[in-house]
Amino acid sequence: MKTFGNNQPIIKLEDYLATLPRGIISGEDVQLPNHSFREIFEFVDLGQNDIFYHLGCGNGIGISIALEEFRVKKAVGIDIDRKKIEDARILLREKNFDNSQIINENILDSDFNDATVILFWFTDTKIIEKMMKKFEKLENGCKIITIWGPLPDCLPEKIDFPYIINKIPFKPAKDLQEQLLAVFGTKCIDFVNAWEYAERYTKAIGSPDAGNDRFLTIIQSLVIWINAKNLGVTCSDEMPPAIKNYIGILRNFFNIEVEHLIK
């Protein structure tokens, strides 16, 4: 195993991420702050004619806000975690909503064919692939909100990064490059783009008092730039000085190596 000057082993970024609590980078198992739900619902223009589903609803806060502040016709939360579902049911009972439903089951087994708006924040590729088959059967016009990335092989309908609207019927992307350009709205990605979008993401999913936001932003910005580099859509073939600096910081101070990800 490689070591650096401090005699600590150098580990690859993906190996480091595997040591973190599940979801700290991907967002899975992270409860969105209330302001993020409001931003999402305003972005998707959620309203009284909508039937809203939150797949992976957690403690039900999103369902409550959709009902109480956006006056949706119906709101349904689905989650496999029984404890979270119990918390969500308590919350909704206290609010006394009669047009809500909280379901404890695997979303892969769920029926949401009446949905007009769906919030779907999962990063597991196996889950996403299976859910795509279910999404494709939804009524035309149904909006599926994702965070950070659009659905695979699809061009987004609308973007306010990190929030992305995918709409039925899906518009296929010719390739990953076209999809990347659609998400970031620019012909090429430089360090400023990468940092801006990484910062938007960490602010969206983080709490106001989170102490690791800057560290996560560094990692996310490097991931964005490296992915763009590998797809051939960076603004220069040369590595920007800021990217070199942050790669050095991760290596020299945190013993994390990311250069191997650059193809």
Image (cartoon, helix red, strand yellow):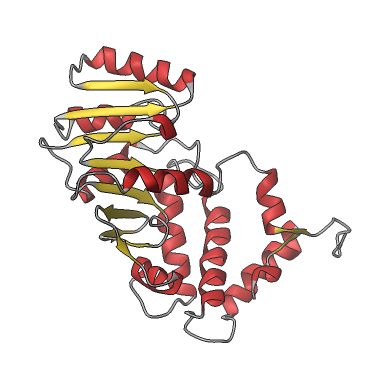
**Quadrant placement of the C terminus:** bottom right
Q: How many marks?
A: 0
Q: Nearer the viewer, residue 60 or 253?
A: 60
Quarter of the figure with residue 23:
top right
Please state the horizontal and vertical placement of residue 43, each as a whole percent of the image. 22, 50
Q: Nearer the viewer, residue 99 or 234?
A: 99
Can you say whether 243 is above or below 161 in the image?
Answer: below
Horizontally, residue 173 falls left or right of residue 215, namely left
Horizontally, residue 146 falls left or right of residue 17, namely left
Can you say whether 62 is above or below 82 in the image?
Answer: below
Q: Residue at x 23, y 22 (%)?
A: 100
**Quadrant placement of the N terminus:** bottom right
Please state the horizontal and vertical placement of residue 44, each as a whole percent of the image. 21, 49
Q: Nearer the viewer, residue 217 or 157?
A: 157
Please state the horizontal and vertical placement of residue 55, each as a whole percent of the image. 37, 35
Q: Residue at x 40, y 62 (%)?
A: 153
Please state the horizontal and vertical placement of residue 143, each as a whole percent of the image. 24, 48
Single out the residue that lies furthest toward the left.
49
Horizontally, residue 232 falls left or right of residue 149, namely right
Can you say whether 149 is above or below 30 in the image?
Answer: below
